[in-house]
Image (cartoon, rainbow, N blue to C red):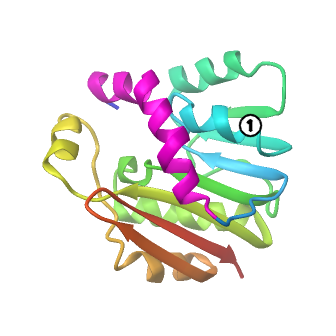
Amino acid sequence: MNRLHRWLCGSARWKSTVESHILPWTLEGVDLGQDVLEVGPGPGASTEILRGRVKHLTCVETDASLADALRQRYASGNVRVLHEDATSMSLRDGSFDGAVCFSMLHHVPSAALQDRLLSEVCRTLRPGGVFAGTDSLYSLPLRLLHVGDTMILVDPAQFPARLEAAGFGDIHVELKEPYAFRFRARKI
């Protein structure tokens, strides 16, 4: 993430937005289970909320400084932070009841790598495990926020087929125009 984006995602305003809008909308009616994987937590606004809702939370973050900061913040408790690439995770097959990602897929630098990430998430879920998340829709402010930053937007119309190809079924994608879409799917 560029400096402005990093600042915004670490701000109290963003944390409030995540807590009051993003997580409630994304996880409405979703039971994640007890052992949950969070992919790409960034500064951890969602992690802070999720850790109070699940028994065990494992976060996979590719940015070393963000992973280190999260690891220090949650040194004791139910959060484990791994610094690794979510397109090639070291986690065992079938480790989790649920997985989530919030507004991070567009930071993955290609559609092919996004698809690898989806397959990896599916691999780490137990049969029937749920994968839920959200990502952004195009807007000029979003584009400006990503100047000098990766922004490979996911087409919500094509996303169900991509999730199915990764091994998911019971797929639901819903738009919240003009800002975002949410998705839910289950490992077959």
Q: Quadrant of residue 75?
A: top right
Q: Quadrant of residue 155?
A: bottom left
Which quarter shows the C terminus? bottom right
In the rendered view, does 144 fall on the left or right side of 51?
A: left
Nearer to us in this view, 147 or 180: 180
Q: Which residue is mark 1?
A: 51
Residue with the most extreme front position: 20
In the rendered view, does 50 fall on the left or right side of 161?
A: right
Question: In this figure, what is the number of numbered marks?
Answer: 1
Q: Is residue 187 visible?
A: yes
Give coordinates of residue 177: x percent, y percent: 29, 64
| Residue 72 position (above or below residue 121) | above
Give coordinates of residue 87: x percent, y percent: 54, 54
Is 22 contained in the magenta span? yes
Is 10 contained in the magenta span? yes
Residue name at image x 76 percent, y 33 percent: 80
Residue name at image x 20 percent, y 34 percent: 148
Nearer to us in this view, 33 or 164: 33
Q: Residues within 10 Å of mark 1 (few under 14, many from 20)?
A: some
- Disc 1, SS: loop
Give coordinates of residue 181: x percent, y percent: 40, 64
- Magenta stretch, residue numbers: 3-28
Q: Main secondary structure of the magenta part?
A: helix
Give coordinates of residue 34: x percent, y percent: 85, 52
Q: Is residue 83 visible?
A: no
| Residue 113 position (above or below residue 84) | below
Nearer to us in this view, 138 or 164: 138
Which quarter shows the N terminus? top left
Under mark 1, the amino acid is Arg
Q: Quadrant of residue 96?
A: bottom right
| Residue 155 position (above or below residue 47) | below
Residue name at image x 54 percent, y 58 percent: 26
